[in-house]
Amino acid sequence: CKELQGATKKIDLWRLPRVLIIQLKRFNYTRYYRDKIDLLVDCPLRDLDLSSYVIPSEEKSNAKYDLIAVSN
């Protein structure tokens, strides 16, 4: 169509793992330099609820995670 179109991106999960590992991008790279992203990451230590991202209803009961470790 060669015209600018509005779009949205949506991610749905069908199944959640028993152990969820999340890696955050903490550096911003450009062509000439690298800079650390200083934004505060606020995550609950207990009961991180991902049920709103899971499609089948039977998987929603297992959609809560507790934080176990952090690597700096």
Image: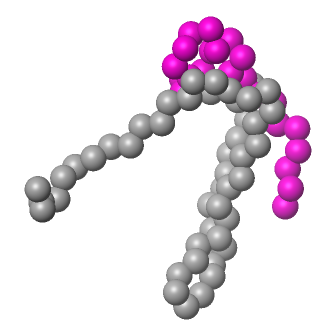
What x and y, as percent, mark residue 17? 74, 29
What x and y, as percent, mark residue 67? 82, 36
Q: Which residue is drawn at the image coordinates 64% and 24% (left, top)? A: 15
Horizontal placement of 3 versus 61: left or right?
left
Horizontal placement of 58 versus 19: left or right?
left
Q: Is residue 62 above or below residue 33?
A: above
Q: Quadrant of residue 64?
A: top right
Q: Quadrant of residue 35?
A: bottom right
Q: Is residue 36 above or below residue 34?
A: above
Quadrant (top left, top right, bottom left, bottom right) of the N terminus: bottom left
Horizontal placement of 30 versus 27: left or right?
left
Q: Is residue 7 above or below residue 61?
A: below
Q: Which residue is drawn at the image coordinates 65% and 70% (left, top)? A: 27
Quadrant (top left, top right, bottom left, bottom right) of the C terminus: bottom right
Residue 71 magenta-highlighted? yes
Q: Quadrant of residue 26?
A: bottom right
What x and y, as percent, mark residue 55? 52, 19
Residues in magenta, as a range: 51-72
Out of 64 and 46, give the one closest to the viewer.
Answer: 64
What x and y, as percent, mark residue 50? 62, 27
Q: Is residue 2 above or below residue 68?
A: below
